[in-house]
Image: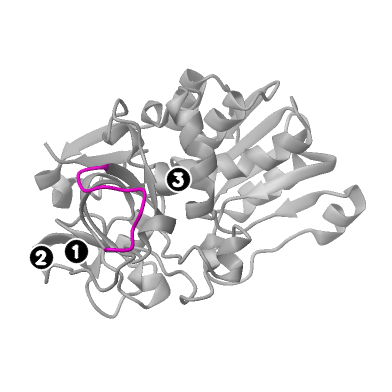
C-alpha cells in the first residue's frame, strides 16, 4: 500500500509499505478519508527532531472502518470515525483517569506519525490502511451529515484548543480570555473558537501574524497586533500558544493575579526561563501538558454535532490526496488532505 513518508529534511514522498493486518479481536483497520496537518508536522519534517530513518506522516484523521476484530462492539464496517492520534488502551489506570496521552501500556509519545519523538513507528494516517489497536477506546463515531474534511483536525489540534480553555471557563464562567499566538498556527485559533462557544465574555487574540489575526477576527475574537512587549491589560484566563521565550513572558505578564495561564506549547531544546517569583507572588496558576485525545473526543464531538464548534472555519487549504507530497510543506495555517 501507499504511505506518505518523510525521507529527510523537507523530503516527502509516497512509499510502498506492507499493508497492516488485524492482530487481535479488539482492533480495527481503517481507511483514512481526510487528514489534517498538525502544527507540529512542519517541525518534524524540517529535521528539527532528527530521525535516523524515514518515518510515516499524518496523525489527525477521519477514517472509514474497513475491518473489525471479533471483540469490537458498537462499531460497524463502513462507519466513519475520528481516530485518536495517541495510542491508548482505554483500560489501564492512566486511561481510566482520563490521561490517555500517557497510557501505561505504551511508551511516552506513542502517536501516529511521530516516530522522531517516540522512537516507535506506529504508521501514519496518510496511508491506504491504518491499524487501530484498541478500537473501542480510540475511535469516535461521527454523524452521517458531518463532512470528513471539516473534522480532519478534531483528533488533535481541535481538542488541544478546546482543553486550553474549557476547564478554566468551567471554573470561572463568562471570564475574559486572551489567546497569545507566537508561533503555533491552528491550535490558538481553535482555542479562540472554543472560548467563544463556551461563553467567554470577551476573547482577545494577540499575535504578530497578520493572517492569523484576520482569521481570529472572522471567528469572532478581537485581534490585537503586538510585538510581545507590554500587554494592554491583564486577563483571568490566558492561553500561551507558541515557540518563543518572549511570547511566553508576554503571556505571563498578561495574566491577572490569581489568574490561570494555560500553555499548549512544547519548548524544544535547552531551558526556557520562567519567572517563578512572579507566578508565586501573584498566585498565577500555570498549566501545561499534552491533550488527552481519546478522553476529550467524548466531550468535543457533541459540540461539533450541535454546530457550536466549526473546525472547518479554521481550515485555510484543502488539497487532493495525490497532491499531498507537494503540498505538505506549504505554510498554510491549517492544511487538509482529502480523498476525492
Of 132 and 261, the residue lying toward us: 132
Q: Are marks 2 and 1 in contact (CB under 8 Å)?
A: yes
Q: Residue at x 35, y 54 (%)?
A: 73
Name above or below for residue 82 compared with residue 235: below
Residue 15, which numbered label?
2
Q: Residue at x 46, y 67 (%)?
A: 89
Residue 260, which numbered label?
none
Name above or below for residue 338 compared with residue 213: below
- Residue 253 spot, x, y in % from top left: 76, 43
State the image quarter where residue 56 is shown: bottom left
Q: Which residue is mark 1?
A: 5
- Residue 214 spot, x, y in % from top left: 46, 23
State the image quarter where residue 22 is shown: bottom left
Residue 157, which numbered label?
3
Left or right placement of residue 252 versus residue 69 in this view: right
Label 2 and label 3: CA atoms lie apart by 26 Å
Amino acid at each position: 500500500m501507499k504511505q506518505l513518508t518523510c525521507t529527510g529534511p523537507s523530503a516527502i514522498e509516497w512509499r510502498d509499505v506492507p499493508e497492516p493486518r488485524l492482530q487481535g479481536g479488539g482492533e480495527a483497520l481503517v481507511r483514512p478519508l481526510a487528514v489534517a496537518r498538525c502544527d507540529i508536522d512542519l517541525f518534524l519534517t524540517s529535521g528539527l527532531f532528527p530521525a535516523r530513518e524515514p518515518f510515516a506522516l499524518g496523525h489527525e484523521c477521519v477514517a472509514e472502518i474497513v475491518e473489525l476484530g471479533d471483540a469490537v462492539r458498537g462499531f460497524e464496517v463502513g462507519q466513519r470515525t475520528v481516530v485518536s492520534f495517541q495510542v491508548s488502551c482505554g483500560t489501564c489506570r492512566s486511561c481510566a483517569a482520563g490521561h490517555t496521552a500517557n497510557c501505561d501500556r505504551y511508551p511516552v509519545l506513542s502517536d501516529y506519525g511521530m516516530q522522531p519523538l517516540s522512537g516507535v513507528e506506529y504508521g501514519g494516517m496518510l496511508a491506504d490502511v491504518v491499524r487501530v489497536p484498541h478500537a473501542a477506546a480510540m475511535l469516535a463515531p461521527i454523524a452521517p451529515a458531518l463532512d470528513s474534511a471539516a473534522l480532519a483536525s478534531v483528533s488533535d489540534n481541535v481538542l488541544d484548543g478546546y482543553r486550553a480553555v474549557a476547564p478554566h471557563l468551567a471554573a470561572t464562567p463568562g471570564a475574559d480570555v486572551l489567546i497569545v499566538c507566537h508561533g503555533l498556527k491552528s491550535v490558538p485559533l481553535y482555542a479562540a473558537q472554543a472560548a467563544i462557544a463556551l461563553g467567554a465574555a470577551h476573547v482577545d487574540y494577540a499575535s504578530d501574524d497578520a493572517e492569523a489575526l484576520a482569521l481570529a477576527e472572522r471567528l469572532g475574537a478581537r485581534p490585537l497586533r503586538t510585538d510581545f512587549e507590554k500587554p494592554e491589560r491583564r486577563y483571568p484566563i490566558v492561553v500561551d500558544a507558541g515557540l518563543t521565550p518572549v511570547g511566553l513572558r508576554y503571556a505571563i505578564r498578561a495574566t491577572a493575579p490569581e489568574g490561570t495561564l494555560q500553555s499548549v506549547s512544547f519548548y524544544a531544546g535547552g531551558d526556557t526561563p520562567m519567572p517563578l517569583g512572579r507566578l508565586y507572588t501573584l498566585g498565577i496558576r500555570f498549566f501545561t501538558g499534552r491533550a488527552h485525545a481519546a478522553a476529550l473526543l467524548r466531550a468535543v464531538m457533541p459540540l461539533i454535532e450541535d454546530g457550536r464548534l466549526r473546525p472547518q472555519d479554521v481550515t485555510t487549504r484543502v488539497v487532493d490526496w495525490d497532491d499531498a507530497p507537494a503540498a505538505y510543506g506549504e505554510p498554510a495555517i491549517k492544511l487538509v488532505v482529502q480523498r476525492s
